[in-house]
Amino acid sequence: MLKKKFKLLLEIYIAFFKLGSISFGGGYSMIPLIEREVVEDKKWVDKQKIIDIFAVSESLPGAIGLNSSAFVGYSVAGIPGAIFALLGNLTPSVIIVLTLSVVFMKFNNNPSVKSAFRGIYPAIVGLVAYASYKMGKTALEDKACIGIMIVTFCCSMFLQIDPIPLIVSGAIAGVVISSVKMIIKARRNSGVIMQEKEKNF
């Protein structure tokens, strides 16, 4: 049992070590990579759960990539899983940053290095766009969700409102909309029952 548990923790560490090694551009670029690894390849969590994890991770302080790693690790193997996922995610970053800090000081004015970074930036934008597309396919399930997305986008783009108030507002809107839908559904059901009773009489 202990050996099986350690094997799972090691698998979590390796999976997130790999993700940490190839995810450039911040936490948002990790979203499609994490989803592919833990949903499609490892099948540790389902699509709906990973969307919930991303949503909660975004609303918490810290990088969404690290927060998501901790949540996934916890979902798979509890607190040890969260720790191993975080360690796996952080290890390559620490190694790469320490190495690049030495190299960058020597070659930061090199034209080839500057050209490489100019190519990396649009690739990162593409990854973020793909992550948004994948999340949207699952999260935007009705017109109300689409409306919340549009309002949030406009508030962020044009009014420069901070993310946390927008996320909290989205959560409140979700609760209100779900409550209204339940009330409408209950009234419809009660109306159908009343009509059936009238027919019986």
Image (tube, rainbow, N blue to C red):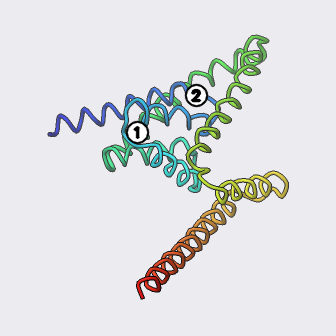
Q: Nearer the viewer, mark 1 or mark 2?
A: 1
Which quadrant is home to the C terminus? bottom left
Q: Give the image location of residue 78, x and y in percent.
A: 32, 49
Marks 1 and 2, Cα distance to the nearest angstrom?
A: 19 Å
Q: Give the image location of residue 156, x and y in percent.
A: 77, 54
Q: Up-down: is 146 above or below 170?
A: above
**Of callouts 1 and 2, which one flags the residue occurring earlier in the amino acid sequence?**
1
Mark 2 Cα shell of 10 Å, populated few (<14), some (14-19), many (≥20) = few
Q: In this view, which residue lies farthest toward the left?
A: 1
Could you tell me which secondary element the residue under label 2 belongs to? helix
Q: State how many labels appear.
A: 2
Q: Which residue is mark 2?
A: 97
Which residue type does callout 1 highlight?
A: Ala
Work out whether residue 164 or residue 135 is closer to the camera in this orientation and state it. Answer: 135
Mark 1 Cα shell of 10 Å, populated few (<14), some (14-19), many (≥20) = many
Work out whether residue 149 or residue 17 is closer to the camera in this orientation and state it. Answer: 149
Q: Give the image location of residue 22, x and y in percent.
A: 54, 25
Quarter-of-image position of residue 172: bottom right
Q: Which residue is mark 1?
A: 85
Left or right, residue 158 beside residue 195: right
State the mark number for residue 200: none
Q: In this view, which residue lies farthest toward the right?
A: 158
